[in-house]
Amino acid sequence: MAEAKTKIIIAIQGKVASFSHIAAMKLFGRDISLIECDTFGDVFSALSRGGAHAAVVPIENSTYGSIYQNYDNISKNESSLIGEIILKINFHLIAHPGKNVPDIKRVYSHPVGLGQIQAFIQNHPNIEFIEHDDTAGAVKMVKKKKLQSAGACASRFAAEYYGMEVIAENIHENPKNYTRFFVVTRPEMRKEVSQYMTNKEKQKRKTTIQFQLGEEAGSLYKALGCFAKRGLALTKIESRPVLNTDWEYRFYLDVLANANNPKFMKAIQELVSYTKHLKILGSYVRGEYLET
Amino acid sequence: MAEAKTKIIIAIQGKVASFSHIAAMKLFGRDISLIECDTFGDVFSALSRGGAHAAVVPIENSTYGSIYQNYDNISKNESSLIGEIILKINFHLIAHPGKNVPDIKRVYSHPVGLGQIQAFIQNHPNIEFIEHDDTAGAVKMVKKKKLQSAGACASRFAAEYYGMEVIAENIHENPKNYTRFFVVTRPEMRKEVSQYMTNKEKQKRKTTIQFQLGEEAGSLYKALGCFAKRGLALTKIESRPVLNTDWEYRFYLDVLANANNPKFMKAIQELVSYTKHLKILGSYVRGEYLET
């Protein structure tokens, strides 16, 4: 008899059927054990205490910008990046089956969800819109409490998961609203976690690095030059202040290359001479844009 | 009889004696008319409707990072930057005169203020810490409601302004916690507003520019090179996503040069060829580091 494969344990902020859960399923399949955390801090604790094999956390949204807490969480903890995925964020109005929009008096969602349906809110002055911790959690609550005149604003998957119905589709304003997620693990777990990933055969790879610069003028220019002169494209640059310094910044660069690419290795060798605390956070398969 | 000089009208988020008010006084003197706004959005509305001559808004904190809403507000509105100032943020426990720390059962402050006194909170388990909209507003509330066993966590100036007493000094954790403020006006008001500024004779100047890049690899490197090869130092780079695009970014650069510096002008001439929507947001006297 074949040995049963252990399920991978993934920590997310939010509940079953949240966008983080959808991101985790796209990368690891449906057969995962989920640790639902209230905060991003709890997600990283679950990872560092060894309860989770990996975490799936949002790092950037095309409308709101970077999710800075997670850049800081990645730096504070011994984190290794092992995957990315980009989800199109579509919001739908979800209610009990058979209901129609005029039946709905109250709608629950996460503040970010409500922020993305402003036109819908203005066009429905008779509906009260109420903040909730989590988009999928709002659907669950409306279902569980049998709130017949209430709705939630969440993903189609949340409607399906809880046996509820989409009664108004795509009520978000921005047709190009994407969220990018990182898969984070501990350095010693990379090999084990990568075996569970559905896209591990793909070749297009990215590497994220982190560094601090000295104070000389032009240091960032020189740092970027290490990649530019070798034809290595950068897809993202992010800076975060370093605690207990006046205004020193920690930079994060996403480079379109695998960490064992010879040009990349040469670039890093040169970059080391300009930087303090250079760290390669991890290489991973370049994330696809996926519908939800 | 000499014509009485009209008072300058400054919009801030927060109340009299808040850190934004202190920043405004450092740059315009004490004789200003203040418009106290609840949100940053309201501050920019007060400016664009013409109610205020200028606004003083935080743009960056050395512990928390950039205040992204204000970068976005500057872009959305026809804004012109005309000053900066950097304040050391010190928090004190403030109560009615004659009180001591053991008398205090509840302390009110802004969530950011409470975030900076975590060790004090842990060392005082008998005190309840409660969130309030505004640091200075918390002092005002404790005073006005005559809450004898309550305190507020705010600036020394807030204590003085409301006739209250500092009963525990410098209770914040991070000894190097600075907030940088921008003075924002409308382009047609620059000349008028600059006449009110106390530092207008100083020579060290900075210019902030905003641009979007094309999609070619190495475009950010080329953009920074326009300044690096002319020996112009950059003190800050910030990127924000552009709404309704997939992942295009709007960059903000702070350059240590006045906009009429010939090297700067050459750099801009070159930069225009790599960018879309280049905009010079304004030159201003380089801000000093000031105690509060």
Image (spheres, coloured by chain):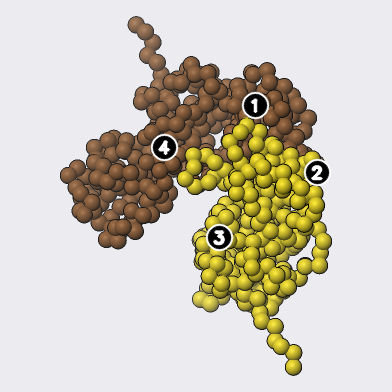
Chain colours: A yellow, B brown
Q: Earlier in the sequence, mark 1 or mark 4?
A: 4
Discs 1, 4: same chain: yes
* Dot 2 or dot 3, earlier in sequence: 3
Q: Can you identify the residue that label 1 sits on?
A: B232
Per the image, the residue denoted by label 4 is B88
| Residue with the mark numbered 3 | A77
Q: Are marks 2 and 3 on the same chain?
A: yes
Looking at this view, is B203 or A104 the one in front? B203
Circles 1 and 2 on the same chain: no
**Numbered label attached to residue A230:** 2
Chain name for mark 3: A
Of residues A207 and A271, the one nearer the viewer is A271
Q: Splitting the image into 4 quarters, where does residue B28 fall?
A: top left
Q: Residues within 10 Å of mark 4 (few under 14, many from 20)?
A: some
- Residue type at the position of mark 4: Lys
The residue shown at (33%, 53%) is B120
